[in-house]
Amino acid sequence: METKNIMIVGVGGQGSLLASKLLGHLLLTQGYDVKVSEVHGMSQRGGSVVTYVRWGDRVASPVIDEGQADFIVSFEVLESARWLPYLKKDGQIVTNTQQIDPMPVVTGAAAYPEDLIQKMRAAGAKVDAMDCVSLAAKAGSVKAVNLVLLGRLSHYFDFPEDVWQKAIEACVPEKFLEMNQRAFALGRSEESAGS
């Protein structure tokens, strides 16, 4: 099987590390060679963060180059737009609709770009966008956005749900397990906002 690539992009403190760890674990249990990158960018709260997950029969490097990502999983709309050049022509974006102002917007030096989802679609990207923050809150914590996103991402894979559940159980601390399982289920069952 050719190597497949997922970029997980967001802002520091949103849970992208757990998301990449969970995906890596799931893919390893399915017999793939898997490489998960370290965090690139400012991992402090508020800085842009990207992690790479690559899997296949044999994966040489953890790095994804421009035009190679099969999926971009984004915790924030501007981050999905920022990393759009990395998406393959037939790739899929799965994004939270939340907007977090970057520092230039906070300081008044720039304005948050408008209509980013429509602009990405106009550029030819397939965009599956949903309000993950509301669903995470419904599950019990706004910090569970990562599991809501993974629930949505699971639609694009042929793995049975119990494979995902076992990965969640292996990667999430027990005291947060039930809430994260609820978040995953809500993301999995939510209707897509188009592609």
Image: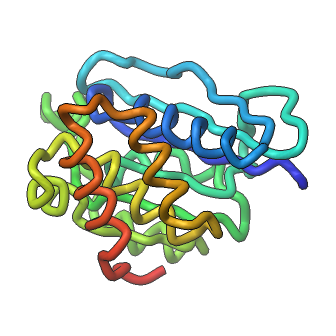
Q: How many labels does the image show?
A: 0
**Direction from residue 195 to residue 113 in the image, left or right:** left
**Direction from residue 40 to residue 111 in the image, left or right:** left
79 vs 141, nearest the viewer: 141
Residue 127 appearing in the image: yes
**Direction from residue 38 to residue 29 in the image, left or right:** right
Name the image colouring.
rainbow
- The residue that appears at 51% across and 36% down in the rendered structure is 20
- The residue that appears at 34% across and 54% down in the rendered structure is 77
Which image quadrant for residue 174?
A: top left
The image position of residue 147, as x and y in percent, is 34, 50
The image position of residue 105, as x and y in percent, is 19, 37
123 versus 134 height, above or below: below
120 versus 110 height, above or below: below
Which image quadrant for residue 45?
A: top left
- The residue that appears at 50% across and 42% down in the rendered structure is 8
- The residue that appears at 44% across and 69% down in the rendered structure is 119
**Direction from residue 17 to residue 46 in the image, left or right:** left
The image position of residue 60, as x and y in percent, is 87, 28
Which image quadrant for residue 49?
A: top left
194 vs 161, nearest the viewer: 161
57 versus 18 height, above or below: below
Q: Quadrant of the N terminus?
A: bottom right
111 vs 129, nearest the viewer: 129
Residue 111 appearing in the image: no
The image position of residue 95, as x and y in percent, is 39, 59
